[in-house]
Image: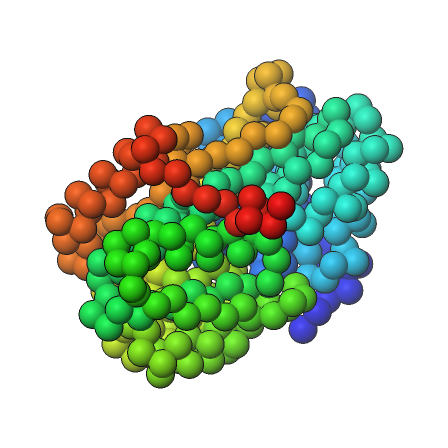
Amino acid sequence: MLRTFAAAAAGLFLATSANASDFTPAIIFDMGGKFDESFNQAAYNGAERFREETGIDYLEFEITNDAQREQALRRMVRKDADVVVVVGFAFATPLEAVAGEETDRKFTIIDMVVDLPNVQSVTFKEHEGSFLVGMAAALASKTGKVGFVGGMDIPLIRNFEHGYKQGVHHVNADDEVISNMAGTTSAAWTDPARGAELAISQFDRGADVVYHAAGSTGEGVLRAAADRGKLGIGVDSNQNGLHPGSVLTSMLKRVDVAVYNAMKSAMDGNWQAGAQSLGLAEDGVGYAIDENNRALITPEMEAKLEEAKASIIAGDIVVEDYYSTQQ
């Protein structure tokens, strides 16, 4: 189903608006597309918020294979975008090449640090948000076994897993966490069948709550949980509504805020290069409670989650990140 770059480029657009000639932002989505109900869609929501609030439209592109990353960046430069936002760690290498040449152009990358004077790098403390949903999983579990399904086996996803395990064991040190990764290539983000398969194997081993950090592969995890009468935990965007009553909560990663801020600050003239990392204290991560899961998160559970959140922000609970374990 992969399209050629030339065909995919036909989807690139710049809608007209009264102010578009003065300022043109751009966004390039990662594998899985802008409607993946997860990471990319959070980025899309941020771009849409910018458009709705300012009346300025944006250039966009959805890659369907890795070779398109640098091509898409160069196309945005040719289109004279004032700031180009790239969504995902895999853009780091092509961005280094393009930003290194286009020194007068602004670039923002989500989920990776690129150390160049015209690049803004936004990362998140996924381990902090994952700690809280790990607590929720342990508080909801009746078997003492919970699961984790990651997408591509990379340090970023291991950071989700590491925080999740700490949250589970904060509630009960004896609880078991069963973990699997969907793969080692970018295809690991776009395989819901594989996600369902891994979740079912964890349910068969006794897990009754499974958290995913797997892009659209995670749709299969949440579907399998609903089909089996178990609980899933969503990621990045609020996925509670995908299967109301069977998604315990979602670990929110405020990619939408990062994208909106990158576009808005570039328009306002106060965009700054450099690295920033957003955690609970910065409202960069969190967990979702709404009408779709309100009955699943009891007031007692919520009180414990909020207490832990406050303790993490205050520094009384220190959530270890995965990267520090590799040093």
Name the one closer to the observer, 26 or 16.
26
The foreground one among 12 and 327 is 327
Residue 50 x %, y %: 51, 32
Looking at the picture, does residue 219 appear above or below residue 70? Answer: below
Does residue 106 appear in this view?
Answer: yes
Task: Specify whether 22 is left or right of 70.
Answer: left
Q: Position of residue 166 (x, y in %)?
A: 38, 52
Counting from the top left corner in percent of width and height, residue 289 is at 25, 49
Q: Quadrant of residue 305?
A: top left
Q: Which residue is depicted at the point 39% across and 38% down?
A: 318
Q: Pick the residue in front: 63 or 312.
A: 312
- Quadrant holding the C terminus: top right
153 w.r.t. 294: above or below:
below
Quadrant of the drawing holding the N terminus: bottom right
Relative height, residue 63 to residue 16 (above, below): below
Residue 112 falls in which quadrant of the image? top right
Residue 246 position in % (x across, y down): 27, 67
Identify the residue at horizontal 61%, vertical 57% (top origin): 154
